[in-house]
Structure formats: structure tokens, C-alpha cells
Amino acid sequence: MKTQILLISFLCIFACSIQAQVQQRTTTFHSGLEKAGFSVNPPQPGFKPDHMVVPVKRNMFDSSGYVWKWDTIMCYNVASGANPFQRASRTYNSFGEQLTILYERRLGSLAWENYAREADAYDSAGNWVYQLQEVWQNNAWVNYQKQEFVYNTNGDQVDWKRVFWDSTAWDNGWHYSWHFDANGLNDTCMFQQGQDSLWVNQWLWIPTYDGNDYMTSSLMYSWLNNNWAVTSRDSSTYNANGNHLTYLRQNWINSSWANNSFQTTTWDTAGNCLSSLYQLWQNNAWENYQFNVYTYDPAGNKVMEIWQNWSNGAWVNGHRILYDYDTSINLLSETSQDWVNAAWRNAYTYQFTYDSWGNLVTGKVLHWFNGWHPYDGGLDVYANHERDMVLQGEMYRYEAVIDSILVFTEPGPSQGQVTLYPNPAHSRIYISSPAASTGSHGSLTMYDLRGQLILTKQLEIGTTGVDISGLKPGVYFVRFSNNGRTRLLKFIKD
């Protein structure tokens, strides 16, 4: 049991050391909400959020010049059947950064009721600096938790605090702080746990780098008896492309270093990981523990990964995951299988559908029991080939309903395109659209964030003006039907 715990810790830290190179935003909202602060070092061992929302900078994979931003996600579980039991709604600023997200729930066919919400703020550089999470209790919004982030002049995150509401005041939760050297390399990370109004040291992480800025070793210290005491050491080697080749974990025991675990990784010439061998130090020798193998299609997309366990002097299949994509490299399905009675047996599958722009509009999780059946579990939501959100715990499918939008991003209109300006707007918006080939001017309909119809108007030749001075501040959608095509755009009334 002890060796298994050590291995899990080793694998977590190794995985996080790789993820440290990618900015991510994660947090935990026990009620079901989650968004995340990215960190160079992982949270505490065993930390696993209930629900994560990872808003990321959008990559323009879509040559159409549109960026997808979902505004409403309808969520279903097995108990709710054909009726959604949860609705998630977002609003954005003019830069496409999330400002608010509201979660509503209902029982059966009853009206939607508030459940939880969060509000976010950003600095002038677009860095996420603040988040407030609240839950709906006794017909009022009640504080749940708050996060604050600080950055240095290079845009590196140097501080992350999370505090929790205890019904009367904010209590310290936990605190990360980072320091970067003159070359922009993270040279320390410290974690502190909240205790009443104080921050109490927990652990300190100090890495070292080679001339190529690859992290070659790191020391972990724990706070004991009001002093830092070294507890473990990690050492890494790399190939010429900077990919990990070996990863060694050692623990400080009886005033000397003792081997704990070791990983060896192989890569192809395209930088794809082909295999990972995990070993444990037992009886003064390295013993095999787990072997992972990965395969890819010609485009470099991972199509299969197999996990094998060492048993009685041989590798035995344990688990594998199969990935299937469409021609636009959208993930269509992710199927997990277990090795049972010398054959692969289905366990779970995740299935997704997309619109013509490659935006994911539905997701579903199923488990195998003499066929595929709905199953409540975790589901990813993707946008522009990137994970945008994880619906986790009690969800078997979701739908990005019609309010999901396409936001026009090109600097100027081209033939056949529709534009809306100014955005945000205060008293009036203008819509420029191409002339209809049939001679019809087409139509315009406007909706609020809840999908309620605001107005219907015929499109005018060239530019159509709409008076919005009577609207409340907020997010609205305008749908255009012209030339047999439909476009949906969003604008903000300030």
C-alpha cells in the first residue's frame, strides 16, 4: 500500500511538471462550480476538483474567421431523462473573457432556480485577477469562496490566494507564491495553508535548470518544527528536443537519499510520446510496475493508449483508451476498455457532435452493460479544439443550445458576411449585410440572454439601424436570415 501511495504521488508530480509549461486555470467549487488558477507547481497531493472550468485563449483553427463562445449549456442526468436539470449561462466582455457564469437547476418540469454563480475580473493585459463564487441559499446569494491573483511585469503569476466564507467572514484557505529569476525561470514555489487569519507554511519547491532552461532537478521541503526540512528530490534528463527521457524520485531518509520511483519515456521524431515505463525501488533493485504505450494517426492525433501492469514476470494488459476523430480533427469519441478474460471489454465511452464550424454542440457519456447505456459521470466541453469546461459528477449528456454564438472577429467584412457595430453599444447598433440574391431583404430577430424574443425587423439594403436605448444593460443576440443562410451574432448593451 505504501509503495502504491508513493507511486501515485510520483506520477502526479511528474504529470504536473510537464503541465507546468502550459498555462491553465483551475479552482474548486464544492457545490459544482470550478475554475482554475494555473500554477507552475501542482496543488497538494490528492487534490482533485469536483468541477473545472478552464477558460483559455482561443486559437483560430477555424478559417471562417469566427470564434465560438457558448452562452448556454443544458445539462441532463439519468434521473432527469429528457428534461435538463441544470443550465449554465455565461456572459463575456468585449475581449471574449468570461465575466459571469450562472448555474440554475430545476426538478422535473418546474421553473429554473438559482443554484450557484461566479464573477471574474481581469487586468488591462487580460490576466485573470479576481473571482467571487456564490451559492443560492434561502432566496439570496451567499458568499462561497474568493480567489485573487497577482502577476509580475513579465506577466508571470506570482501569487494565488483562495479564501472561504464561514457565514460571517472570509477564512484563509490556501496560498501559492512563486518567484522567477532574471531569465524568467520559476526558481521557487511555496505553498501555505490557511489557519484562521494566518498563513502557515506547508511545503517549498526549489528547482534547478541546465543551460537550455530544462529543469534537471528539484528539491521539496516540508515545514517541520518551524524550519524547512528536505523531504524528496526529483531528477530529470531530456533529449535534444526537450522531451523528458528519465525522471527519478528519491526520498530523504535517515540522512541519505533513498530511491523511490523511476520513469523512462520514448518519443518519435515528431515529438509524440511512444511509451512510458514506471518502476519502483524494491529490495535494492528497480522492479517493473506499469508500462504505457501510445499510438498516433498520420496527422499526429493520439488514437490509442494502453496501460499494462507487471505481473509474475510479464506485462499484462490492464486498460486502454481508443480515440476517434472526424476529418476536421474534432474528437468524436473516447472509449475506455478493460482487459478481462484475455479480451478487451468495453467500459465507458464519451461521444460528441459538432456543427459545420467544428464547434462542439453535444456530449454524452455511456457505460457498457450488455450494450451502451446512459451513465452519470464527467463530460468535457470543447471550443476551437480546446477543452473549455468539465461537467463532472452527475451528468450523462449536455447540449449547447441555440444561444451558443459565433462572434465575428475579422477586421473588416468581405462579400457575403454580416457585421454588427459598435460592440459594446449604448443607444444604437448597425448591421451591415449583403443584398439578398432573391430580391428579399431578409429578416433580423433579437433575443435576450434567456432566449426571449425582443424584436423582429426586416433587413434594409446596405445597413440596418436598431434603437437599443430602451434595453437593459446586458448581453443580446441578433439572428440574421438572408440569402437562405442564417448568422447569429452577439452584442453587449452597456
Image: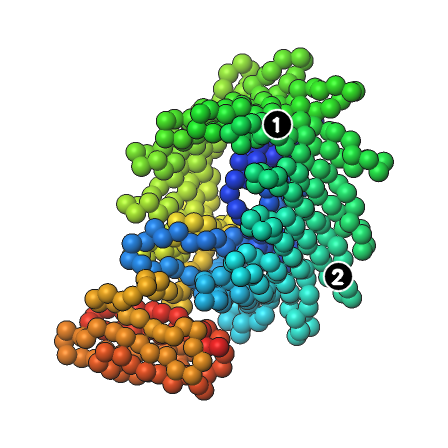
**Crowdedness near tag 2: few (<14), some (14–19) or many (≥20) residues, C-alpha within 10 Å:** some
- Towards the viewer: 223 or 107: 223
Please provide percent x and percent y for residue 363: 42, 53
Please provide percent x and percent y for residue 315: 49, 19
Q: Secondary structure at mark 1?
A: strand
**Crowdedness near tag 1: few (<14), some (14–19) or many (≥20) residues, C-alpha within 10 Å:** some
Q: Residue at x 61, y 60 (%)?
A: 130
Please provide percent x and percent y for residue 15: 55, 35
Residue furthest toward the right? 225
Q: Is residue 95 left or right of residue 117?
A: left
Q: Determine which of the numbered discs, if any, sits on residue 170 in the image.
A: 2
78 w.r.t. 459: above or below: above
Asked whether the beta carbons under mark 1 and mark 2 sit within 8 Å of each other, the answer is no
Which residue bears the numbered disc 1? Answer: 217
Q: Is residue 222 left or right of residue 157?
A: right
| Image-quadrant location for residue 489 | bottom left
Q: Residue at x 53, y 36 (%)?
A: 18
Q: Residue at x 70, y 19 (%)?
A: 258
- Towards the viewer: 377 or 289: 289
Please provide percent x and percent y for residue 369: 46, 42
Q: Secondary structure at mark 2?
A: strand
184 w.r.t. 396: above or below: above
Q: Amino acid at mark 1?
A: Ser
Quadrant location of the N terminus in the rendered image = top right
- Towards the viewer: 219 or 83: 219
Q: Which is nearer the N-term, disc 1 or disc 2?
A: 2
